[in-house]
Amino acid sequence: MTSSVFAAERLLFTRATPDNDAIPTIFAFPNEYTVGITSLGYQIVWATLAMRDDVQVSRLFTDTREQLPRNPELLGFSMSWELDYVNILNLLESLEIPIRADIRDRNHPIVFGGGPVLTANPEPFADFFDVILLGDGEDLLGNFIEAYKQVRNASRQIQLKALAQVPGIYVPSLYQVEYHTLDGDIKSIQPISPEIPAIVQKQTYRGNVLSASTVVTEKAAWENIYMVEMVRSCPEMCRFCLASYLTLPFRTASVEESLIPAIERGLAVTNRLGLLGASVTQHPEFETLLDYISQPKYDDVRLSIASVRTNTVTVQLAQTLAKRDTRSLTIAIESGSEKLREIINKKLHNEEIIQAAVNAKAGGLSCLKLYGMAGIPGEESEDLEQTVTMMRTVKKAAPGLRLTLGCSTFVPKAHTPFQWFGVNRQAEKRLQFLQKELKPQGIDFRPESYNWSIIQALLSRGDRRLSQLLQLTRNFGDSLGSYKRAFKQLKKQIPDLDFYVHTDWSTEQILPWSHLQGPLPQSTLIKHLADATSKINSSPKELQPLNL
């Protein structure tokens, strides 16, 4: 299987010939090949390493691998989904590397990790990694390799202390976390010695050339797709949204210097093009790019676009997509309630959602996928009723257009103003209410699993005490039941599930990631939180723990 999978790849870069003393490195994606090779972040880091002559890199997935070095010095993981931690632990064991960093010695590689999950909040996984790269890989990766080369032959402790000096490189073992009680709040997070930085700053790449696929293959989950990143971050700044807050500022790729050359490169080897970004249609030159792709020479190109902003759905956009073999469009609306959208800072009105549906149908699309959320802070039953009413109105305004509402539960994310809110205990009932109301209307309602949201919240707000829990749940299987079983086993040794998931936290509390600085300081996040809570007109119980 191995050779056929890699043989199907068409590379869009030239691999370097490694030097004799190149650093033997394994770069892993903790999931199957078809999933990993579809991750643009994984592709870029792998290609960046493979183009260096001072690194000899081999890839590793859960179901296939290139030939691995006998004694790797570096072992990296790109982590895009929280639950992939199970696969990381399995892969470490299969390579005979201790799962916990504190048991590794000079004979083991330095295990490093990066990607959205670890940049947001690495703490639940901190004990499994020697080094975590926080932020954009463009500059960070090269700085990491250069710093490692300087201490390549030193002792492990010297290596780790040297790497910790590089901006954006976080070495968890060099920070001491104290708790008020075993199962209580965090008391302090301090570096273990004065030469270690007290705060690690996430690194932000500010160039106007963004990422594009480095490999195209029919074996990818999105077959033969060539992906181009159009924008990074999002100017909307919805207060719950990790994709916006964690990756600020909003950056756009230059059409002339970056996007058109990248698209030409990709369309020379495939006719499937994916435009990526949290808010693709907000690129200031999006229309120019659309005109470029609309040229007759690209008539056979199949175009896919990530989520778009509602008020940018024009008839022209829908026509271009329909002509390019795209049947549907995806829009995040969060709620049909104007009040809730104000609370979360979603600058959007119901008329715009209705107009987007009308335009999508007029342009020849057959389906509109909307994304909503249940359990948003401040949500009351009338807000859910307004979502149902709005969906009915959209259906009436664009008859014949297939409507889908995907709906998740609000999950607090680190580095966002809503990190202090817990998950609403009523969210599951609210998803059931929407299902009951929308199904008879012929609207395809797709709720995300509430239990999965609970686990997501646990991992997105967890601290490093959770590493014991994660090792246990891995043995029990990763269902919600196995997490509860592990919590029971660790009773009084760590806080309970409720503390991490449902409790509203005080803004005075030391958060698990307080020593890791995102794009905005905590004081700014608290201002954004205060603005949101001032708009929540529910009973004071919702706000009590927030000490604003």
Image: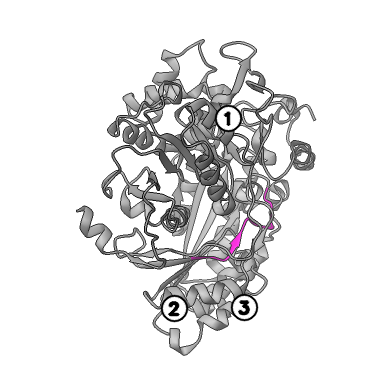
Q: Which residue is mark 2?
A: 324
Task: Check disc 3 and report its element: helix, strand or loop.
Answer: helix
Q: Residue at x 59, y 69 (%)?
A: 356
State the CA–CA distance, disc 2 to disc 3: 15 Å
Q: Residues within 10 Å of mark 3 (few under 14, many from 20)?
A: some
| Quadrant in the picture for residue 236 | bottom right
Q: Nearer the viewer, mark 1 or mark 3?
A: 1
Please state if 165 lies on the left or on the right of 488 as rendered: right
The image position of residue 364, as x and y in percent, is 48, 78
Prevailing secondary structure of the magenta residues = loop
**What residue appears at the point 66 percent right and 61 percent down from the top-left corner?**
251
Residue 302 visible in rendering: no
Residue pointed to by mark 1: 161
Q: Are marks 1 and 3 in contact (CB under 8 Å)?
A: no
Mark nearer the viewer, 1 or 2? 1
Q: Nearer the viewer, residue 249 or 404?
A: 249
Q: Secondary structure at mark 2?
A: loop
Which residue is at the front of the view, 18 or 295? 18
Q: Residues within 10 Å of mark 1 (few under 14, many from 20)?
A: some
Residue at numbered disc 3: 287
| Start-end of magenta stretch | 228-238
Q: CA distance from mark 1 to mark 3?
A: 49 Å
**Residue 144 screen position, x and y as percent:** 54, 44
Mark 2: which amino acid?
Arg
Between residues 397 and 202, which one lies in front from this camera angle?
Answer: 202
Task: Please name the residue shown 58% across and 25% down the image.
Answer: 174
Amino acid identity at mark 3: Glu
Q: Are marks 1 and 2 in contact (CB under 8 Å)?
A: no
- Density class for disc 2 (Cα within 10 Å; few <14, some 14-19, many ≥20) is many
